[in-house]
Amino acid sequence: VQLVESGGGLVQPGGSLRLSCAASGFTFSSYAMGWYRQAPGKERDFVARISSGGSTYYVDSVKGRFTISRDNAKNTVYLQMNSLKPEDTAVYYCKTTNWGTHYWGQGTQVTVSS
């Protein structure tokens, strides 16, 4: 299993970014995918999840601003982030769980600052 995130960067408050996570090594369409984030000095926290059937779940702090989606033909999960705030600054990771084993990508840095 390999997960590779991309799309992070520096953005001003109120701006937007779209993160991508390219997956390989497993039957992507059969598994839920999630996004997590870790701010400096803090624990890694759940952000959003999309089931194999397309149902979505979000932490309250990003509801209405972030959208998780998946393209099974491209084995890719996305996180569209709008109305970004300084408190969204973190390293963002995608995750999947296959047969009880958690797999993580290497992360992509998102910095929201003026």
Image (cartoon, rainbow, N blue to C red):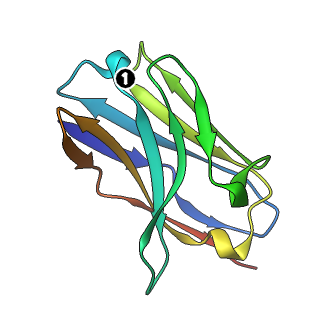
Q: Position of residue 77 (x, y in %)?
A: 47, 33
Q: Position of residue 92 (x, y in %)?
A: 46, 59
Which residue is farthest top?
73
Q: In the picture, residue 14 is in which quadrant?
A: bottom right
Q: Residue at x 51, y 50 (%)?
A: 7
Q: Which residue is mark 1?
A: 75
Q: Position of residue 4 (x, y in %)?
A: 31, 44
Which residue is farthest bottom?
41
The kind of residue on which mark 1 rests is Asn
| Label 1: which secondary element | loop
Which residue is farthest front?
100
Is 75 positioned to the left or the right of 3 in the image? right
Decide which of 24, 34 is in the foreground and name it.
34
Q: Residue at x 44, y 20 (%)?
A: 52
Decide which of 76, 38 is in the foreground and name it.
38
What quarter of the picture does the N terminus occupy? Answer: top left
Q: Is residue 100 above or below residue 12?
A: above
What quarter of the picture does the C terminus occupy? Answer: bottom right
Q: Position of residue 45 (x, y in %)?
A: 48, 64
Q: In the picture, residue 10 is in which quadrant?
A: bottom right
Q: For mark 1, does the 10 Å Cα neighbourhood hold few (<14), some (14 to 19), or many (20 or more) residues?
A: some
Q: Residue at x 45, y 81 (%)?
A: 42
